[in-house]
Amino acid sequence: MAENRKKQIEFSRLIEPHLTSLYNTALRMTRNQHDAEDLVQDALYKAYRALDQFQKNTNFRAWIFRILVNTFITAYRKAVKQPQKISYDDLEEFFLFKRLDESASLQEMPKEEFLENLFDDDVKGALENLPYQFRIVVLLCDVEGFSYNEIAEIIDAPLGTVMSRLYRGRKLLQRYLWDYAKQRGYITDDFKQKK
Amino acid sequence: MTSNKKNDHKNREKHFDCADVEKYVQQYLDNVLDEEKKRLFEEHIDYCLPCDKKVEFERKFREIVRLKTKRLVPAEQVNEKLKNLLKNIH
């Protein structure tokens, strides 16, 4: 029993600094509080049971996120049979910058101001709408600050896959935000005349 | 002297154009470009104002995404729940 207690204390010590970011990531992945709580709970149980496999002095944060992401993917795959299909036709680099540049309604407004004026909910909504494979890498890199190598370890994929999903995910995010801005009337389709 | 001249010649040959900036902007902002590419990238945006503006916009975009999505401090009860779970885990 004393062994068990020791393990519990050790586990709590390791996990507590990461609870908030695990929960936030879970919330972005599942899109609702109830599922996020369940997901974190499942991940914590799995991690606790697998604690002996965690090698001391290695990257605990990457290890626990790997369990979280795997748990999510397993559950998600059960819930959604068809992978989401995305068209990448117009996913060019600097997508948003270029669209803003073409837009007549923003002539007087600095582009940075457009970004600052976006509602938190729009940015969160755009992120949550990304197909999950892209959403996970964008979250891990741009929100949680993991390196490419750590992400490769977490999602168990080659570095090239991480980079390609990350770059596509960011561009897709820009496209969604552009669409929101149009829907909300920040931007009109009144583009500059192209010669 | 000869060696310097050689290096000068070599450096003159290599430049990044606007298409290279598009190609490498994400890696540049993620700070994963090797020293040489990073130097060429910065050399280009130092004199190309349109590219510099685009890169700065992209930097700002990431900052906005991080700031507007990051901190959702979990509701007290969630935090409490998770901590209780930790106490009773076995």
Image (cartoon, rainbow, N blue to C red):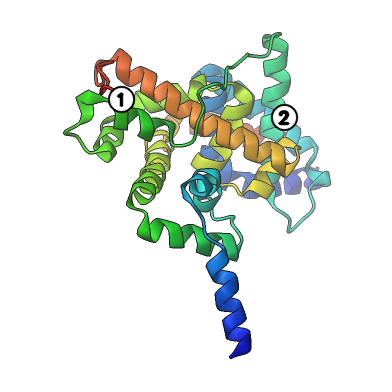
Residue B78 position in % (x across, y down): 49, 28
- For this orientation, the residue located farthest to the front is A195
In depth, the one of A4 and A52 nearer the eye is A52
Circle 2 Cα neighbour tier, 10 Å, few/some/many (<14 / 14–19 / ≥20)? some
- For this orientation, the residue located farthest to the right is A53
Q: Is residue A195 left or right of residue B2?
A: left
In depth, the one of B27 and B37 nearer the eye is B37
**Tag in front: 2 or 1:** 1
Q: Is residue A131 left or right of residue A68?
A: left
Residue A193 position in % (x across, y down): 26, 22
Residue annotated with mark 2 = A70
Note whether A148 is above or below A75 in the view shown: below
Note whether B11 is above or below B47 in the view shown: below
Residue annotated with mark 1 = A195
Q: Quadrant of residue A58?
A: bottom right
Disc number for residue A155: none
